[in-house]
Amino acid sequence: MRRLLVFVSLVLATLLLAAYPDKPITFIIQAAPGGASDMVSRTITAIAQEILKVPINCTNITGAAGAIAMKRLQTSKPDGYTMGYVPVELSMVKALGYADFGPEDFDLLMRIMVIPAALTVRADSPWKTAQEFIEYVKTRPGTVTVGNSGPGSIWHIAALSLEKAAGIKLVHVPFDGAAPAVAALLGGHITAVTVSPTEVKAGVESGQLRILAVMSDERTPLFPDVPTMKELGYDVSIAAWGGLALPKGVDPEVYKILADAFKKAYDSETFQKFLLDRGMTPAYLDGQKFKEFAVAQYNMFMELIPKALGK
Amino acid sequence: MQQFVQGFLQAIDPRAIIYLLVGTFSGLIIGTLPGLTATMAVAIITPLTFWLSPNEGLAMLIGVWNSAIFSGGISAILINTPGTPASIASTFDGFALTKKGMAGLALGINVVFSCVGGILGIVALIAVGFPLAKFALSFGPAEYFTLAIFGLSTMVAVSGKSILKGMIAGFLGFSIALIGLDPIFGSERFTFGRMELLGGISFIPVMIGLFGIGEVLSQIFTKSRTMSADARITTQLKRVVPTFKEVKDLTPVALLSSLIGIVIGVIPGAGADIAGLVAWDQSRRIAKRPEEYGKGSLEGLAASTTANNACLGGALTTMMALGLPGDAVTAILIGAFIIYGVQPGPIMFRDHANFVYMVITLMLLANVVFLAVGFFFSKILTKFLSLPQSFIWATIIILSLVGSYAINNSAFDLMIVFLSGVLGFIFRLLDVPLGPIVLALILGPMAEANMRRALILSGGSFTTFFTRPISLVLLILSAVSLLTSVLRKRKS
C-alpha cells in the first residue's frame, strides 16, 4: 500500500512537472505603466502567453529605481510562476546604495534590447561634431550645462563617463525623467542632453535638435549616420538595456520551457517591429551570455558610480 | 482638405465609434473608482490596441482618457474622494453640494462643464496650437519654480477659517514631500533605511486616505455622537440637468478656468490636478458669489471641472506640436502613436495631417459621447447615496483600500492609506483643512527640484527668478493672489 502511494505520488509529481505551466504566471514590471520597460514587458508577455497557453499577469511595482520590484522578484518562489523584467538598474542599484543584490542573485533568462546614450545639442548651436563640442567645453570648463534624467540615472552616468573619457568638466542638471530634460534643451535652458536617441527623435526630425554622437559600441539603427563616441576616439560605452529574469534556483526544465517560449516571442515579427518602432536596438543574449554581460556591467558601475556621486 | 476629410472619415468609422464607446464606458468606471487613474487605464489598454487599426485603437484610448478625467469628479462629489488626482479641487464644492442635498445638480454641472472644458481645450489646439507649444518651451526651471509658487499661493484660500491651521497643514504636506531621494543629489532623505521610502510617500494613497477614509471615520464618529438623521440620507436626487440660466451664469467662470486649464496643460509636467486647483482659486476673482467658494458654490465646482478637462487639449497640444509628453497620459500616447508609425512632433502635421485630424475629431467625439452617457451614468450612481449609511461607508473603505493597493501592488501603500485616514479624521475633528496638505504634496517637490535646478543654471544667483520675464510675472501674480486671499480672510 505504501509503495503504491509512493509510486502514485511520483507519477503525479512527474505529470505535474511535465504539465508546466498549468496556471497563470505573474510578471513583475519594475517601472510605472507607460514607460519603455512597461511597454516591452507587456508586449512580449502578450505574445508569450499565446505560446505558453497560460495567462501572464503583469504587475507594476515602482520605486527606488526598480529595486523594490527586483527585490520582490528575487525573494519569490523559484517555481517558474513568478518572473520579471530587469533593466540596466539591476547592475546599478547596489552601487547606488538602494539594495544589496546584483545580477548573480537571479536566474537571468535573456537580454532583449539595448538603448544607447546619445549626446544631443540644439540644431542652431555652433557644434556640428562631438569633437567641436568637446573642444568648446575644454575652453570653458564647468560652464556648459548638460541635462540628464535624474541623479544616478543611466543617462547621468553617461554624461559622467563622457567627462572622464574626454577629460572635460560639465555642469550636470538632473531632471525628473528624460522628457523634461529634452524640453529644457528645446527651450534653450540647457546646452546639451545625454539621453537616448528615442527621446530626441521628434526634435531631430523636425530640425530643432542635432545628435552629435551615440555612446554605444555600434551605431543605432534609428540614426545610422550618427557616429559612435568610440569611432571618434573617446572610450565611452553606456547604454540602457533590458531583459527577463527569474528568482534564483528555477528547475532547469522549467527554465528551458520559459526560455524557448520567450525566444519565440522575441523572434516574432510583431515584437521585432515593436522594438524598432520604439527606437530600441534588438539585442538578444541567451541566459548565460546575459549573465556575463550583466556582471561585467555590475563591476563597471561598482567602480564608476561611487566615484561619480561621491558615495 | 482631402487630408481633413480622410481623417474625419476614419474617426467616424462605425467600428471606431464602437471602440470609442467601449473606451468611454471603461473610463467612466475606472475614473470613478478612487485610486484607479486615467494614466493607469490608458497604459494597460495601450498594448491591447496594437492588435487594432490606428483609428480603432486611438478611439478606445481617447475615450478612456477623456471620460476618466471627467468621472473622477463623480466620486469627488458623491463621497468626497477624488476618483483621480485631477478632481481634487472638485471635492471642495462638489461634496459641500452633496451635503446640501444637491448631489444631482453637482453631477450635472460636472458633466456639462467637463465637456465644455474638453471641447475648448481642443479648440485651442486647433486655433493656436503651435504658438501655445512655443510658449510652453519658454518654461525653464526658474519658471516652473515660480509657477509652483503661484499654485502654492492658493494655500490661504484652501485654508478654511484659520490661516494658521492651514499653514500647519501645509507644513506637514511639505515635510511628507521631503521623504525619499533628493531630486538633485540622489541622496536618501528620511528613509530610515527602508527601501519602500526611497521613492517617497506615494501621493494617491495619501489623498485617498485623507479624503475617503478620513471622511468615513468622521461620519461614523459624529453620527454615533449626535444620532441625528444625517443630511445625506435625505438626499433627493432632484434634477441632474442644469437649467439654461445656471449654465449661462457659470459661463464666465468656465471660460477663465478653461484658459487656465489649457495653459497649464500645455506646460509639460504640470497636469490636470494643478489646473483644477489653480482655476478653483483664481476664478473666484470674477465669480458672482465668491464668498460661497468651498461651501457648495456651483461656480467653484464649474471652475475645477472645466479646468481639468481643458487640460487634456493643452497636454495633447504639447505632445503633437513638440513630440514631448504634456502629462503622464500623453507620455503613453506618444508610444501608441509611434507603434502606429506616426512620430508625434511638428513634422506630424506635414507628413500625417490626416492622423492629426483623426485624433482631433476623436477628442471632440469623446467629449460629446461622455456628455450623453455621463448624465445617465451619474443618475444611476446617485442611487448609491440612498443606500443605508453603513453600506456606503463599507463600500468607500473597500474601494479606497483596493484602489490604493492597485497603484503599486504594495502593502506599504495600504499602511499609508490607513495612517492618512486616521490623520484625516483627526484633522476634521480639529478643524484643520486638508487642502493645504494636498497642495504642498503636489507642488512642494515641483518647487524644490526646480528652484535647485534654476540655481544650478544661474550659478547660484537668486536674481534669475526676477530677471526672467515670465518668472517675474508669476511672482507678481503670486504676491497679488496671496495678498487678496489674506485680505478676504480678514474681512470675513
Image (spheres, rainbow, N blue to C red):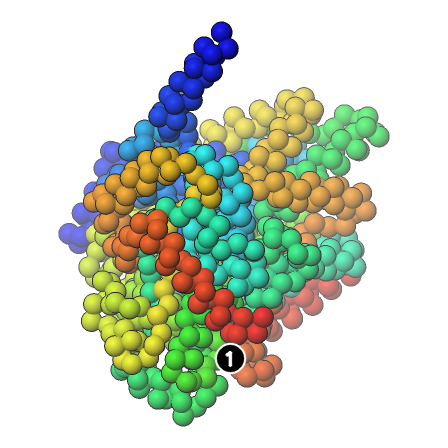
Identify the residue at image location x=48%, y=80%. Answer: A171
Q: Is residue B221 visible?
A: yes
> Which residue in the rendered view is the most extreme toward the front?
A3
Identify the residue at image location x=44%, y=72%. Answer: A147
From this view, report whether residue A167 is shown above or below residue A200. Answer: below
Residue B232, percent across and down? 69, 29
From this view, report whether residue A25 is shown above or below residue B442. Answer: above
A118 to the left or right of B472? left
Identify the residue at image location x=63%, y=44%. Answer: B412
Query: Is B382 or B25 nearer to us in this picture?
Result: B25
Q: What is the secondary structure assignment of the residue under circle 1?
A: helix
B484 to the left or right of B270? right
Q: Quadrant of residue B152?
A: bottom right
Query: How dense is the environment of label 1, judged by Cα within 10 Å: few (below 14), some, or many (20 and up)?
Result: many
- Dot 1: chain letter: B
Residue A10, percent across and down? 43, 19
Identify the residue at image location x=15%, y=52%. Answer: B2
Residue B172, percent across and down? 72, 57
Residue designated by label 1: B457
B134 to the left or right of B438? left
From this view, report whether residue A22 is shown above or below residue B51. Answer: above
Residue B87, percent across and down? 55, 46
> Which residue in the rendered view is the most extreme toward the right?
B225
Query: Is B279 or A114 nearer to us in this picture?
Result: A114
Label 1 is placed on what type of residue? Leu
From this view, report whether residue A49 is shown above or below residue A222. Answer: above
How many marks on residues?
1
Query: Is A40 or B421 nearer to us in this picture?
Result: A40
Q: Is residue B242 visible?
A: no
Q: Quadrant of the N terminus of chain B?
A: bottom left
Q: Quadrant of the C terminus of chain B?
A: bottom right
